Image (cartoon, helix red, strand yellow):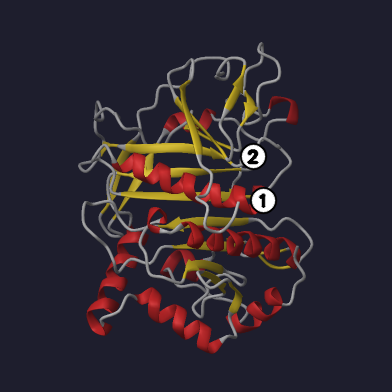
Amino acid sequence: MTETDPLPFHAAEFTKPDGRALTLYGLAPVEVRGEIPSPAGDPPVPRPTMRWHPLRGEWVMYAAHRLGRTFLPPPEYNPLAPTTNPEHPTELPQGRYDLAVFDNRFPSLTPDAPPPEHPAHPSERAGTGKCEMVVFSQDPSGRLAGLSGAQMALLLAVWADRTTRLAQGGKIRSVLAFENRGVEVGVTLHHPHGQIYAYDHIPPVQARMLEGARTHLAEHGRPWLADFVAAEREAGSRLLRDEGEALSVVPPFARYTYETWVLPTRPVGRLSELTDAERVAFARVLKDALLRLDALFGVRMPYLLTVHQAPLDGEAHPEFPLHIELYPYLRAPGRMKYLAGTEQGAGEFANDKFPEVAAAELRGLEVP
C-alpha cells in the first residue's frame, strides 16, 4: 500500500442470538467461522432514566440493571474473547477480523428507553441514547498501543463510521468514544476495549467546548485549533510529536500531570472529515503518545482516553476542534492522581508539575 492508495476498510454486520447488533471490521474482508454467539442467559431488561441537576445544569443517568454486569472475570470466562467452546459462548465469534463493535449488554442509555412508570423526580425522563462496546483486538493480553499503524488508522475509521451511523436516526446529538484503561479508573474487563456513548443531547463538557470555540472564532476570525497548533509549534516546549498532518502535545493548561492531546493540524470537527493521509498521521501520533505513557514509569499507565467531535445537531460546526484527550492517572511512580476537594468541589484542578516539564520527560523517552 502506498500513501496514495485508499486505506483498507471492510465491515460485516450480524445480529446476535439475543437480538443485539454486531459489526466486525477488518483490514481484509471479514471471515467468520462458526455461529455468531451471545453469552448464556437472557440479557437484563434495561429501563434507564435521567434526572436533571438544576444547579449544575446537567443530566444524571440511572441504570440499576448495570449492577449485575460482569466484573473482572478470570481469563477462562473472558466475554470479549472469541468463543472457543460453543457451550460457553462469549460476545465474539472465531474468524478473521481486526475490531468488533456490538450493543452493550448492560447499557446506560437505549434508543427505545420507555418513559418512567412512576417518576420520583419532576424532571425524570427516559434515558434515550445508545451504548456500544468496541473491542480493539482478539488478543486478550493486548493493548491499544499494540495495534499496528494500519489497525490504529482502522480504529479511527471505525469511530468515524459509528458516529455517522448513530447520527442517522435523528435522535443523537453527540457521540463520545472513550477507553478506560486499568482497574484504577474502574475497568471491569481487562480485554482491550473501549466504549461509545451516544447522547440525545449535547453533554456539558462538549457544550462548553463549543461555546469557547464559537467565542474564539467570533473574536479572531479563525478556528481555535488553527491558532493553538500555530502557537504550540512556535513554542515547541510542549510538543511531543509532529507528523505534519497531526501532532501531540501536553497542553499549556493540562489538568493531569502527563495529560496529552492528539490533534489534526487542519481544523476539522469530526473524524469523518479527515483525509486518508491525515488519518494515517493521526494514527501514528496516537500510537506514539500511548507508547510514551506506558514507557514513562515502566508500567501500563492507567488512563482515560476521550475522543471529542462536533455535535450532531444538524448544523455545521467549523469552529469545533476534533481532538483526543488522554488523562494519565499516575502523576509519579506508584502515585495516583485523585480528584479531591478543589477538583470535585470547585471544578478547578491542581497540578503538581508544569506542562513544559512533563512534556520534556515524555519527549525524551525512547519508544518503538
Residue name at image x 39 percent, y 77 percent: 226
Q: Which residue is mark 2?
A: 137
Q: Residue furthest top?
A: 87
Name above or below for residue 361 compared with residue 54.
below
Quick one: SS at disc 2?
loop
Mark number for residue 237? none
Q: Position of residue 358 (x, y in %)?
A: 65, 78
Q: Which residue type does callout 2 highlight?
A: Ser
The tag on residue 148 is 1
Rendered residue at 47%/64% (across/down): 344
Q: Is residue 156 above or below residue 262?
A: above
Q: Is residue 167 left or right of residue 266?
A: left
Q: Foreground residue, 257 or 213?
A: 213
Using the image, determine if residue 60 lies above or below residue 338. above
The picture quadrant where one finds residue 189 is: top right
**Residue 91 in the image, given as x and y percentages of width and height:** 57, 25
x, y (%) of residue 325? Answer: 51, 63
From the top left corner, tell me how far across and down residue 169 is, in percent: 26, 37
- Say which of 190 and 142 sits in front: 142
2 vs 1, front mark: 1
Q: Identify the amino acid type marked 1.
A: Ser
Q: Residue at x 59, y 64 (%)?
A: 285
| Crowd band around label 2 with a 10 angstrom C-alpha radius: few (<14), some (14–19), many (20+) | many
In this view of the protein, which residue sits in the foreground, 35 or 58? Answer: 35
